[in-house]
Amino acid sequence: MNTNEIKDKRIAVLLSGGVDSSVAVYEFDRLGLHPDCFYIKIGPEEKEDWDCNSEEDLEMATSVARKYGCRLQVVDCHQEYWSQVTGYTMEKVKAGFTPNPDVMCNRLVKFGAFDAKMGHDYDLIATGHYAQTEWIEGRKWLCTSPDPVKDQTDFLAQIYDWQLKKAIFPIGHYEKNEVREIAEREHLINARRKDSQGICFLGNIDYNEYVRRYLGEQAGDVIELESGKRIGTHRGLWFHTIGQRKGLGFGGGPWFVVKKDVAQNILYVSHGYDPATAYKKEFPLHDFHFLTEGITSLPQHVTFKIRHTPEYHPATIEPLSDGRYMVHSEKSIHGVAPGQFCVVYDERHHRCYGSGEIAL
């Protein structure tokens, strides 16, 4: 964390109750700073049957704020979350795409709705993300964390340039085990608490159940891609993702989801693990979103990710006449699906340029 960047600044910390954001507060305390902390309340929608951990989260956030002499305020972004992020997710899922709700939560809620409600009074908004920022030639860039497994720049690759300018990531230079060690040493209440898994707003509810509540079921045929043979029925294309292998429940497996025909409501599967159709070397991106103010084009040689994994794939980028970009990957990539975000980095996978939606 650059001390020059935070000197004399009004800082808000988004404190979730997890160990990462708690150690972020410690990092400020170490510098003699006691920023205002905020707990964002986003869900779930119906308390009685959506089992959620938010009560425990708030208790832990309260304990950490008290320990470091910081004020804690609860900010209710429930409405914004369920209308904007859920709306985005369901619209994409219904169209047969593979969206990422956590990516949009950062843009629309953590750095969006929160800023509109409270953050506008602050110069910087700090979170417990594993990411870094760097000023290079007068521009602020989103840069990767040294922990390749935990790095979260891919989840931040859709925030706006003005949001990046306000963002600060106090633990971004650490690896996860170092954060845990600090939490143990500091006797933080959540030092050994498990990391949250899955989508941030669902609590313990099953993702398919969540989709079912919004979109219901719509039965259709499941067809083997190679033979055209009907092998069963699906309950809705939105319950399946390209590349899915588990939970299909058809005999004579393993089966593998390779394609969806939304117009005909057909799910295409393939026998055997890796049909050639499940791999792609070239795919277009539309609506590429640049993170850094003033940067409007991509270099020819890049690395990229299409899902949250430690690996970066080398590629060349070709700008197309209609404003889209064509990604030419050096290797065939498995499970490329429309609607996924392709996150683009420089060749050293240090600086993140932003992300675009895969359009097939």
Image (spheres, rainbow, N blue to C red):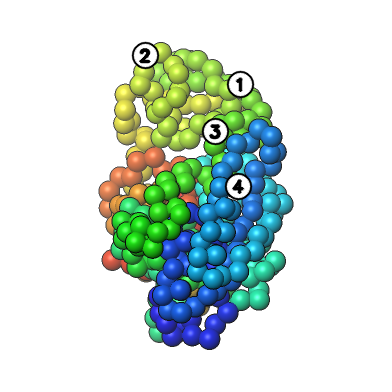
Q: How far is mark 3 from mark 2, CA to CA?
A: 26 Å
Cβ–Cβ under 8 Å for marks 2 and 1: no
Q: How far apart are marks 3 and 1 (CA)?
A: 20 Å
Front-most of residues 126 and 339: 126
Mark 3 vs 1: CB contact within 8 A: no
Q: Is mark 2 on a helix, strand or loop?
A: loop
223 or 81: nearer the viewer: 81
Quarter holding residue 47: top right
262 with respect to 299 (left or right): right
Q: Is there any visible trace of residue 328 in the rendered image?
A: no
Give the residue at mark 2.
252
Residue type for callout 3: Asp
> Which residue is label 1 attached to?
219
Coordinates of residue 216 in the picture (x, y in percent) = 66, 28
Which residue occupies the foreground of this view, 318 or 183?
183
Question: Which tag, 3 or 1, sits closer to the chain's start?
Answer: 3
Residue 206, which numbered label?
Answer: 3
Tag 3 near tag 4, CB within 8 Å: no
Image marks 4 and 2: residues in contact by CB distance under 8 Å: no
Q: Give amino acid for label 2.
A: Gly
**Sequence-wise, which precedes: disc 1 or disc 4?**
4
